[in-house]
Image (cartoon, rainbow, N blue to C red):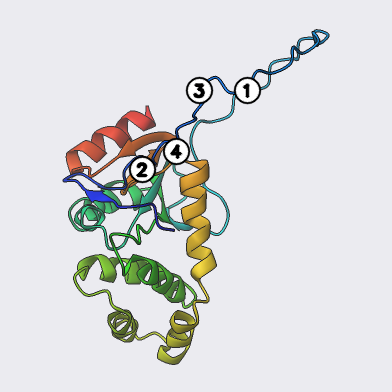
Amino acid sequence: MVLGIATLSGQNCAPPAPSQVQNPDPEGPEQPEQPEQPQQPEQPQQPQQPEGPQPVQDEHVLAVGSPPVTVIEYADLECPVCGRFARETLPTIKQEYIETGKVRWVFRHFPLSNIHPNAQKAAEATECAHNQGAFWPYHDLLFENQAALTQPDLKLYAGQLALDQAAFDVCLDSGAETARVQQDFDFGFNQDGVNSTPTFFINGQRVVGFQTVAQMRALLDAAAQ
């Protein structure tokens, strides 16, 4: 899950572009001439598919009814920019758009473990909380306490939410949810091209970096047109 040495900007937490492998012979070895292939009949045009990622089963979703706009957020629980968005922007968006049935909000994990050593276990801890029906309260609690995300801290927050402490501790210590977090990360990196947090897809349109309430309102209103 390590992406190399990452850098933190004012707007997002982002790894550098992967290094390029130099080919000593840019043109490569000479290839034998291929025989001309018979022309294939033109295929009928397929219906256009929506751009960008779409919500799938087993997601963490906030929604009322069937909203016309879907936002998919990739975030790192230890990323300070993600935390700023969760504390400063998301509560208002939740009140004005999610709770009024205008927007469906989907959360996906994208821990940048090379610069945020607690991000992976924090993500796993939210999944352990999810097993007890407390993903979103636990998600909020972690973003409110980003300076304290060690494993003992994560267990303490489970107690604050009155979760089954023994079950939570076993889940976290065993790494039972490692694969669930990796699933989000791999899908984001390999399928959606995510390389920094926070990254949003608003009805399939990519938006990278911190968004103020005003900026997010404008984006959501435009997507609803």
Q: Quadrant of residue 18?
A: top left
Identified at 47% across, 63% down, the residue is 181
Three-letter code, disc 2: Phe
Q: Estimate the spatial distance between the alpha carbons at disc 4 and disc 2, rounded to whole Å.
A: 16 Å
Q: Secondary structure at mark 2?
A: strand
Query: Which residue bears the numbered disc 2?
Result: 200
Three-letter code, disc 4: Pro
Q: Is residue 172 visible?
A: yes
Please tell me whether mark 2 or mark 1 is closer to you in this view.
1
User: Quick one: label 4 or label 2, which is nearer the N terminus?
Assistant: 4
Nearer to us in this view, 77 or 87: 77
| Rendered location of residue 72, percent (x, y) | 41, 46
Q: Estimate the spatial distance between the alpha carbons at disc 2 and disc 1, rounded to whole Å.
A: 42 Å
Q: Estimate the spatial distance between the alpha carbons at disc 1 and disc 3, rounded to whole Å.
A: 9 Å
Identified at 24% across, 56% down, the residue is 91
User: Quick one: label 2 or label 1, which is nearer the N terminus?
Assistant: 1
Query: Which residue bears the numbered disc 1?
Result: 29
Q: Residues within 10 Å of mark 1 (few under 14, many from 20)?
A: few
User: Quick one: label 3 or label 4, which is nearer the N terminus?
Assistant: 3
Identified at 52% across, 64% down, the residue is 180
